[in-house]
Image: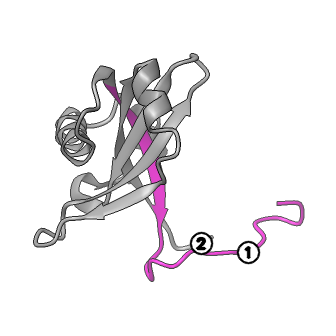
């Protein structure tokens, strides 16, 4: 069994109106690292049309709000949540500071889970003969 930890992550989904979505359509994916506060780093994805037909910018965080899970039940409960509300608030503010002029239609959080290894490097191997 691989030596991994599952960690809680929160993302903020910032809904865009049609004008902002068109204006930012060529925006690259970005990573922002604060120059003096190592705990403040974010990744930002460009506008993506989600299955609900709406465009969202997505921002996620580094280790700042990570929680390590210790059971399958904790992971299930996390996926039923909308993530950490404080993280959503702070990340949304950071996104709007980095992209002046964006006018969100709505904002909501969502829960995500990442896998961490002791070396912080990815494992690449066969899990079973077919996977």
Distance from the alpha carbon under mark 2 to that under mark 1? 10 Å
Question: For this view, does 131 lie left or right of residue 59?
Answer: right
Of the 4 image quadrants, the one containing the C terminus is: bottom right
Q: Quadrant of residue 37?
A: bottom left
Identify the residue under disc 2: 2
Q: Residues within 10 Å of mark 2 (few under 14, many from 20)?
A: few
Colouring: one colour
Residue at x-position 22% and y-position 41%: 87
Residue 127: x, y in percent? 75, 66
Disc 2 vs disc 1: Cβ atoms closer than 8 Å? yes
Identify the residue under disc 1: 125
The residues colored magenta run 108-131
The residue lying furthest to the right in this view is: 130
In this picture, is 88 found above or below 104? below
The residue lying furthest to the left in this view is: 36
Residue 3: say if magenta: no
Residue at x-position 47% and y-position 73%: 117
The answer to whether residue 79 is visible is no
In this picture, is 2 found above or below 87? below
State the residue in front, 87 or 100. 100
- N-terminal-most mark, 2 or 1: 2
Q: Which SS class for mark 2?
A: loop
Q: Which SS class for mark 1?
A: loop
Question: For this view, does 87 lie left or right of residue 72?
Answer: left
């Amino acid at each position: 069994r691989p030596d991994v930890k599952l960690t809680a992550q929160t993302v903020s989904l910032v809904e865009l109106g049609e004008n902002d979505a068109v204006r930012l359509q060529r925006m690259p994916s970005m990573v922002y690292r604060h120059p003096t506060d190592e705990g403040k780093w974010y990744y930002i994805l460009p506008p993506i049309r989600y299955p609900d037909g709406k465009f969202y910018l997505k921002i996620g965080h580094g280790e700042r709000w990570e929680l390590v899970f210790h059971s399958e039940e904790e992971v299930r409960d996390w996926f039923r949540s909308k993530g950490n509300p404080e993280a959503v608030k702070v990340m949304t503010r950071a996104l709007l500071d980095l992209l002046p002029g964006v006018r969100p239609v709505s904002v909501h959080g969502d829960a995500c889970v990442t896998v961490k290894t002791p070396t912080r490097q990815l494992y690449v191997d066969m899990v079973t003969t077919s996977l």
